[in-house]
Image (cartoon, helix red, strand yellow):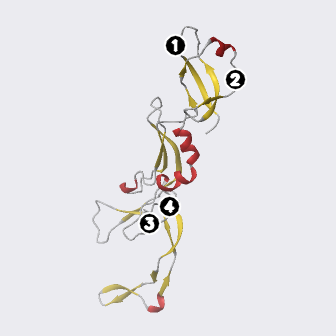
């Protein structure tokens, strides 16, 4: 229980996100055991994925265009996106902030600003998934290799083996569960948890082995 052939590590889905955010940043650890269920969600974080706009900045969908309503100006509805988690980088991006105000000019109202109301700042850039940064929050690319190596090894080399082995009567009568067994093919010691219905005439007997070393 708790293991499948494909074990997924996901970010929470958010209906406010665009379709491009579907499975963005998700990752998977395989377990090569055909007797397991095909797949399961091992981890689903409480934060949603965050897409990147064409300008290279993160997009947080706070508004959506209102459709089916005639209006001179575009109307918008507010959204309540799922909380996000992003990674702040050491890179900075120069941005110009401009304060504008409305001014009546004849029959028109225009937005104007002055040089005194303009400021240039260089905030640090944050990312969610990035092909150019050394680190990001992509499970497959960054998080699984960095923080889940032991779990990946456990999935690749299962904790429990259930081979069928040939046992003599002497091996069964002298058997002690306190003595681990060594499997050369696995390069590890195992605890013999169970010998299943041994009969002297059987060619092999199923046993349950619990891995002790990796």
* CA gap, disc 2 and disc 3: 53 Å
Q: What element does badge 2 sit on?
A: loop
Give the left or right position of residue 82, taking residue 194 as reference.
Answer: left
Picture residue at 56% right of the left edge, 34% below the top = 186
| Circle 4 or circle 3, nearest the eye | 3
Mark 2, mark 3: which one is toward the viewer? 2
Q: Which residue is mark 1?
A: 203
Q: Which mark is residue 136?
A: 4
Q: Which residue is mark 3?
A: 132
Question: Where in the figure is residue 120, as x and y percent of width and height?
Answer: 48, 84
Q: Earlier in the sequence, mark 1 or mark 2?
A: 2
Compared to residue 14, the image places residue 166 above or below, namely above
Residue at mark 2: 177
Image-quadrant location for residue 51: bottom left
Tell me the quarter of the image containing the N terminus: top right
Residue furthest out toward the top: 201
Question: Is there a contact, CB below 8 Å, between mark 2 and mark 3?
Answer: no
> Where does residue 173 sit, x and y in percent of width and height?
68, 13
- The residue nearer to you, when weighing 6 against 177, is 177
Q: Residues within 10 Å of mark 1 (few under 14, many from 20)?
A: few
For the point 42% across and 84% down, the residue is 101
Q: State the residue at coordinates (38%, 71%).
A: 55
Up the image or down, 211 lies above or below 56; here it is above
In the rendered structure, which disc, 1 or 3, sits on the residue that comes first in sequence? 3
Which element is circle 1 on? Answer: loop
- Residue 158, how many percent across, how many down? 55, 35
Discs 1/2, front:
1
Residue drawn at x 62%, y 21% is 194
Report helix, strand or loop for mark 4.
loop
């Amino acid at each position: 229980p708790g293991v499948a052939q494909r074990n997924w590590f996901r970010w929470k889905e958010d209906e406010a996100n665009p379709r491009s955010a579907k499975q963005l940043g998700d990752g998977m650890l395989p377990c090569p055991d055909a007797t397991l269920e095909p797949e399961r969600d091992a981890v689903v974080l409480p934060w949603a994925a965050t897409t990147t706009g064409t300008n290279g900045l993160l997009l947080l969908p706070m508004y959506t265009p209102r459709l089916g309503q005639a209006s001179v100006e575009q109307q918008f509805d507010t959204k309540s996106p799922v909380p996000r988690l992003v990674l702040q980088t050491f890179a900075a991006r120069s941005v110009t902030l401009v304060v504008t105000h409305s001014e009546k000019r004849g029959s028109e109202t225009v937005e104007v600003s002055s040089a005194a109301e303009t400021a240039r700042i260089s905030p640090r850039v944050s990312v969610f998934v990035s092909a150019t940064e050394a680190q990001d929050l992509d499970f497959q690319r960054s998080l699984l290799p960095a923080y889940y190596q032991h779990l990946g090894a456990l999935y690749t080399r299962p904790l429990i083996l259930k081979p069928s082995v040939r046992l003599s009567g002497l091996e069964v009568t002298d058997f002690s569960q306190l003595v681990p067994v060594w499997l050369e093919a696995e390069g590890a010691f195992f605890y013999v948890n169970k010998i299943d219905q041994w009969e002297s005439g059987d060619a092999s007997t199923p046993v349950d082995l619990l891995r002790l070393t990796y």
